Image (spheres, rainbow, N blue to C red):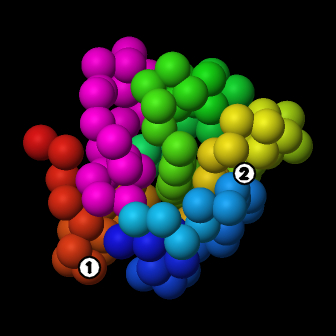
C-alpha cells in the first residue's frame, strides 16, 4: 500500500515525507510500547502508534522503520518533524483510534506483521 493510499483510507494528514512518498508499505505493526517495536525486524513496515514524542522517532530509526502513523489525533511537534525529515522518514497523523486505523488498513489490504 502506498503512503498516499494510507492517508486516503484513514483521512490522514501527511506531516512530512521523504521522496519515498510513493513507496510501498507492505506490513503494519501497532504498538505504544517502544520496547516491543525494538524487537521488530521487517522491511517496508508501517508503525502505528499513539506515542507522539522524539523517542518514537529514535526507536523507529533504530528499527529501520521509515513510516509512522500517529493515531488519536496526536500532534507531531516541530522537533519530531525536523528529526524525521533529517532521517528521511514519513509521518502521518489521523483521527482514528489505533484499533480502527488497524482494521481499516487491514480491510484495505495491509498485511499484519504477525
- Position in image of residue 10 (x %, y %): 46, 76
Q: Secondary structure at mark 2?
A: loop
The boundaries of the magenta stretch are 25-46
Residue at x 62%, y 23% (from the top left corner): 58
Q: Quadrant of residue 43?
A: top left
The residue under label 2 is 75
Mark 2 or mark 1, earlier in chain = 2
Circle 2/circle 1 CB separation < 8 Å: no
Q: CA distance from mark 2 to mark 1?
A: 25 Å
- Examine the structure image and report whether residue 71 is included in the region drawn in magenta: no
**Rendered location of residue 9, percent (x, y):** 42, 81
* Res. 7 in view: no
Q: Is residue 38 above or below residue 16?
A: above
Q: Residue at position x 67%, y 67% from top?
A: 14
- Position of the N terminus, as image quadrant, is bottom left
Residue 20 versus residue 11 in the image, above or below: above
- Quadrant in the rendering for residue 17: bottom right
Question: Which residue is label 1 attached to?
Answer: 108
Amino acid at each position: 500500500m502506498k503512503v498516499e493510499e494510507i492517508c486516503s483510507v484513514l483521512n490522514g494528514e501527511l506531516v512530512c515525507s521523504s521522496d519515498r512518498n510513493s513507496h510501498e508499505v507492505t506490513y503494519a505493526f501497532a504498538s505504544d510500547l517502544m520496547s516491543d517495536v525494538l524487537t521488530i525486524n521487517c522491511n517496508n513496515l508501517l508503525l502505528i502508534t499513539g506515542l507522539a514524542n522524539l523517542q518514537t522517532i529514535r526507536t523507529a530509526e533504530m528499527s529501520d522503520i521509515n513510516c509512522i502513523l500517529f493515531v488519536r489525533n496526536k500532534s507531531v511537534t516541530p522537533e519530531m518533524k525536523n528529526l524525521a525529515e533529517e532521517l528521511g522518514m514519513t509521518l502521518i497523523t489521523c483521527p482514528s483510534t489505533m484499533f480502527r486505523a488497524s482494521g481499516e488498513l487491514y480491510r484495505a489490504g495491509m498485511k499484519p506483521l504477525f
